[in-house]
Amino acid sequence: MANLNRAAELITSFKQVAADRNYSDQRAFDLADLTEQVALSLRPGLRKHNLTLNVDCQPNLLMNSYPGPYGQVLTNLFLNSVAHAFPDGRAGTIDIQARESGKDNVEIIFSDNGCGMSLDVRRRAFDPFFTTRRDQGGTGLGLHIVYNIVTNRLGGRLDLDSEPGAGTRIQIILPRVAPLEQAAE
């Protein structure tokens, strides 16, 4: 019965995440609930990669924004960490934290304790088509897409901090109410 309930929870979460990804309209949502739903969809692959995912979100952070693009940001960051931060099956931890930042913003910290980035990689991390894993099928678009969604669609900003051997930390500041979409020119 417990396994059936867990399966039902997973299916509900997958359906909501899938609906949000296909539904790009602005709506009200609780950031902690949405972050947990996205994390739930990412957890099944953790064991085979020897990784742990920790989520720590302040409750009742209500937003009026774009849940699908926000979920895509978290997913891309997660997949980027899995692909680049933990080479050769190295064990590690990925953390997602969300907190209020003043009355009008939220702060999301996405971090891992992986191998980190050199200065050159860090400088180019958000450039389109830049990847350190081209030979393994990397397109170099994951972090570029993250940057565009955060800065354009969600109206936020982000900061990358990483050192070789010291992991990576990405701070994202988002307005609780996303700006209206720009009219197509």
Image (tube, rainbow, N blue to C red):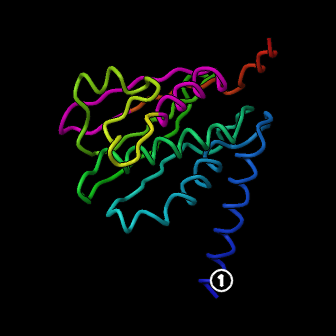
Q: Residue 171 placed where, x, y %?
A: 44, 29
x 32%, y 64%: residue: 50
Q: From the viewer's perspective, is 136 left or right of 1?
A: left
Residue at 27% x, 45% y: name it: 114
Q: Position of residue 20 (x, y in %)?
A: 73, 47
Which quarter of the rendering shows the N terminus?
Answer: bottom right
Please name whichever residue, 84 or 109, is drawn nearer the observer in this view of the structure.
84
Residue 137 in picture, x, y percent from top left: 40, 47
- Write the start and end of the magenta stretch as one range: 141-169
Residue 147 drawn at (x, y percent): 52, 26
User: Which secondary structure lies at badge 1?
Assistant: helix
Determine whether, in the image, residue 163 is placed left or right of residue 101: left
Depth check, front residue: 73 or 120: 120
Residue topped by disc 1: 4
In the displayed image of the protein, which residue is found farthest to the top? 185
Instruction: Out of 103 and 106, give the one closest to the viewer.
Output: 106
Q: Is residue 179 above or below residue 2?
A: above
Whether the magenta-drawn stretch holds residue 157 is answered as yes
Amino acid under label 1?
Leu
Q: Nearer the viewer, residue 66 or 31?
A: 66
Instruction: Name the residue: 23% across, 23% down.
Output: 119
